[in-house]
Amino acid sequence: MRQRIRPSHIRRSAAFVAAAAVVSALPAVAAPTAFAEEGEPSVVISNLPSASPKPGEVYDESVVLTNNGTAAADGVTFRIRLTRGLDFPESVQGCTYSTVGDQVRQALCELDTVIEPGASIETPVRFKALPHALMEAVEYGTGPTGETPVEGFSDSYRRLALTADSTADLAAVGEWTEALAGNKQSVTVRLRNDGPGWIQNNESDDQPALMVQIPPGASAVEVPKDCAPFAIDGPSGPGGTPGKPTYVCSPADHTIEVGESLAYTFMLKIDAGVRGTIKGEVKATSVYDIHPVFDKNTANDKDWLRIDIPTDYEDGPTTSGGSSTGGGSTDGGSTTGGDGNDPVGQSTGGTGGTGGTGTAGSPSAGGSGTGTVNGNLASTGSDGTPLLAGAAAAAAALGGVLVVAVRRRRSITESS
């Protein structure tokens, strides 16, 4: 038999409720409480206090559910959701646990109680921060009459965004390759998250991005869709626009997992008459070129996109598969590994040429002159799609580039 709760009294529910969180693209603004019709309960919930838990710490707070309606709420379904950097510290009797959407942990708890009109109950909310916790959110509450809540937020179902007491280290990875004046050359640059925290930022301007300067003496003729022209203080046009000097590249869902490397491949046209080495800076930053507050290590924020152009060469036979410059690898990474900032000599994924240096009469199986313009390939295979409003970046293939093999008269001296 359920116990009746008298108005103005607050009691702790019998079921010990664990916490939960979710990332949602819907605005975290509570809608006004609907007018309770005669004979209908109207449950509202208090706000959880904000916090910045360290990885490994347990958050343990309580919320109060109050019935502002004119009828009793006979039984309450309490839902909690957690983003992937949070988890439930233990299982609680009366709660059913599952994983929904994009790695979101959920608890659905049945509170075997009755809330009379004007009365309140208190129930705990508990969760722990995992080692990769950083930008997190907790979604908690019930429906207006105590039923299972629908998607979206109201006075009975709320969302708390929090930032764990941790960091994430963004790293820029460039490329060093060769090309011929007047020809086209594909180049791939990367944005990598070295952790320890994962990044999903829909709350501030610290959305992770890679700033790419096209080397003077070259022009971008094909651009990834996730790379927009950059003006003085932000994006200034649609992604994929060619012919601009600087681009800002960012994942569509603003998400980068720990250890993930996002690759952005450009097709450049080298100006006729250019010789020596041309270079442009690549920089790990935010969409608005403001250094993210969560990134405390600036040593690996910058790298270079370098292209060596022969100063003295003689035209050789034309092949359809080889490249005089090489610079690719069969796994899509750059064999140069940027400018020393990539600890393993190459990024962990992405696009790029399929390797090989073409020679006269013996074309290779690919070359750095081919490549793929896709804008956003995660080396980990994660689709990075948010739970409720995800968007996946599409990849567009680029191929069939005719590369001229050359016979070098003398070696090229590497220059920085």
Image: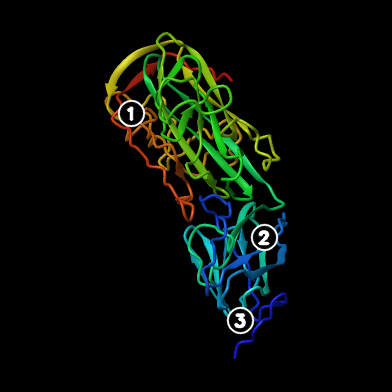
Front: mark 1 or 3: 3
Residue underneath mark 2: 47
Query: How many residues crowd around disc 2 within 10 Å: few (fewer than 14), some, or many (20 or more)?
Result: some
Element type where label 3 sits in the image: strand
Q: Nearer the viewer, residue 79 or 320?
A: 79
Question: Is residue 151 something that shows in the picture?
Answer: yes
Q: Quadrant of residue 139?
A: bottom right
Residue 22 x, y percent position in the rendering: 55, 58
Cα–Cα span, label 1 and label 2: 63 Å
Residue underneath mark 1: 322
Please tell me whether residue 221 is drawn above or below residue 290 in the rendered image. above
User: What residue type is disc 1 on?
Assistant: Gly
Residue farthest to the front, as pictured: 38
Please tell me whether residue 73 is drawn above or below residue 237 in the rendered image. below
Residue underneath mark 3: 113
Cα–Cα span, label 1 and label 3: 74 Å
Question: Is residue 326 something that shows in the picture?
Answer: no
The tag on residue 409 is none
Q: Quadrant of residue 20?
A: bottom right
Query: How many residues crowd around disc 3 within 10 Å: few (fewer than 14), some, or many (20 or more)?
Result: some
Q: Nearer the viewer, residue 298 or 78?
A: 78
Element type where label 1 sits in the image: loop
* Residue that appears at 58% across and 50% down: 258
Q: Nearer the viewer, residue 99 or 263?
A: 99
Question: Mark 1 or 2 closer to N-term?
Answer: 2
Residue 112 x, y percent position in the rendering: 59, 82
User: What residue type is disc 2 on?
Assistant: Asn
